[in-house]
Image: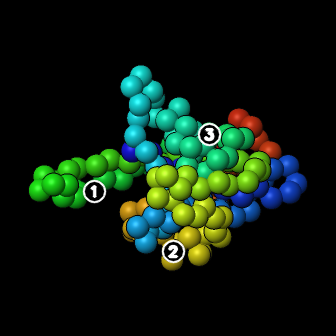
Amino acid sequence: MLQAIFPTPSPPAGRYSSLRSLSAAQRDETRFCHGQLEEGEDAPTAAIREVREETGLVLLELGPELGSIDWYFLQEELLVHKYCSFFLMRSEGGETIPEIAEGITECEWLPVEEAMTRVTYENAREMIRAAVRHLEASVPGDPGSPAAL
């Protein structure tokens, strides 16, 4: 499973001033875009594909992997252990179109503080914190910076 977090570029020179979290409301949950790897697909390729499918955004730039989370749940009386990797992404624009067929009713950009209160699961909030740490560690204007997106 893959999820994506998007920073907000601020002028000048595409620096990041705050994080916007692209979330999708589904089953009364606020979460990040996510999905499964398709056969022969690597995680970064799948992350871009899933975000395009769920949001309609086309102009996406993949950044670094932020980390992963795992959790357990019951499905038809079987205990399932699921893992999810998070990636930082950037989109210069475009209108979001929620993937209604998948139960996504809304895609929205949120400031960090609001995303921290709206995102349903604590382990996903930790990935927001990881994105913030990553963006704060980047060196503005240094394309060679390991933290630059």
- Looking at the image, is 79 positioned above or below residue 25? above
Residue 71: percent from left, percent from top: 27, 56
Q: Position of residue 84 (x, y in %)?
A: 38, 48
Amino acid identity at mark 1:
Trp
Q: Could you say which disc has been placed on residue 118 in the image?
A: 2
Determine the residue positioned at 73% across, 54% down: 95
Which callout, 1 or 3, points at the residue further toward the start of the chain? 3
Instruction: Name the side, left or right, on which 147 lies relative to 140.
Output: left
Q: Earlier in the sequence, mark 2 or mark 3?
A: 3
Q: Is residue 147 in sight in this rendering? A: no
Quadrant, the N terminus = top left
Q: Quick one: SS at disc 1? A: strand
Cα gap from disc 1 to disc 3, whole angstroms: 25 Å
- Which part of the image, by quadrant, shows the C terminus? top right
State the mark number for residue 71. Answer: 1
| Location of residue 53 by image quarter | top right
In the image shown, does 85 or 54 lie closer to the viewer?
54
